Each structure stands twice: as C-alpha cells, then as structure tokens.
C-alpha cells in the first residue's frame, strides 16, 4: 500500500502526504449522498481531494477505486 504514491510538485516542495497534519481533506458529496446523510445514513463521498495547507494547492485526489474503499 505504499509503493504507488504519486509524486507531485507540492508534495516534494512542502513534504505533503495524504496523512500529513498540514493536509486539508475536502470531500464532495452528490446530492443523493447529502440526502442520505441528512437521514443519518452514511454515504461515500463522490470526490475526496487533498489540499496543502502551506501553499493551498491540491496535490492529490482519491481514485474511484480508493473512494470505494473509503471509510
Ligand atoms: Zn504545498
């Protein structure tokens, strides 16, 4: 689970990784998922993006496969 970490300019400059404390995770849900969440039913996000708190840039994003396994 560690060999395919993508290299990004920000990741190298700022030393960011998905699990870094300076990482901001932004989740996007579909309208249907928000509807379910309102009723207390947990739902998978449509998109999960990772932003660097140091430079504000997005440096990573979960692939559809990873979102399937996202908890
Ligand atoms: Zn950065």
Image (tube, rainbow, N blue to C red):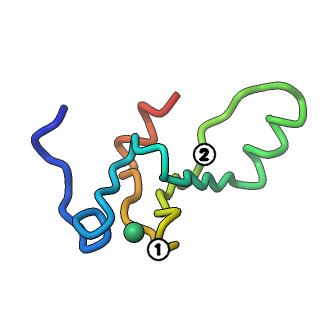
Give the residue displayed 68% in from the left and 52% down from the top: 29
Give the residue displayed 60% in from the left and 38% down from the top: 44
Quick one: SS at disc 2?
Answer: loop
The residue that disc 1 covers is 55
Of residues 36 and 12, which is closer to you in this image? 12
In the rendered structure, the answer to whether residue 62 lies left or right of residue 12 reads: right
Q: Position of residue 19 (x, y in %)?
A: 40, 40
The residue that disc 2 covers is 45
Within 10 Å of disc 2 (Cα), the crowding (few <14, some 14-19, many 20+) is: some
Ligand 1 within 8 Å, label 1 CB: yes
Give the residue displayed 14% in from the left and 47% down from the top: 4
Quick one: SS at disc 1?
Answer: loop
Q: Position of residue 54 (x, y in %)?
A: 48, 67
Q: Position of residue 62 (x, y in %)?
A: 40, 51
Earlier along the polypeptide chain: callout 2 or callout 1? Answer: 2
Q: Residue furthest right?
A: 39
Ligand 1 within 8 Å, label 2 CB: no
Please, is residue 43 above or below residue 34 in the view? Answer: above
Which corner quadrant of the figure contains ligand 1? bottom left
Q: CA distance from mark 2 to mark 1?
A: 24 Å
Image quadrant in which you'd find residue 39? top right
In the rendered structure, the answer to whether residue 57 lies left or right of residue 17 reads: right
């Amino acid at each position: 689970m560690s060999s395919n970490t993508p290299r990004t300019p920000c990741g190298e400059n700022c030393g960011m990784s998905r699990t870094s404390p300076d990482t901001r995770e932004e989740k996007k849900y579909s309208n249907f998922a928000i509807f379910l969440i309102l009723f207390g039913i947990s739902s998978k996000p449509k998109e999960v993006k990772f932003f660097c708190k140091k430079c504000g840039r997005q440096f990573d994003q979960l692939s559809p496969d990873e979102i399937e396994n996202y908890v």
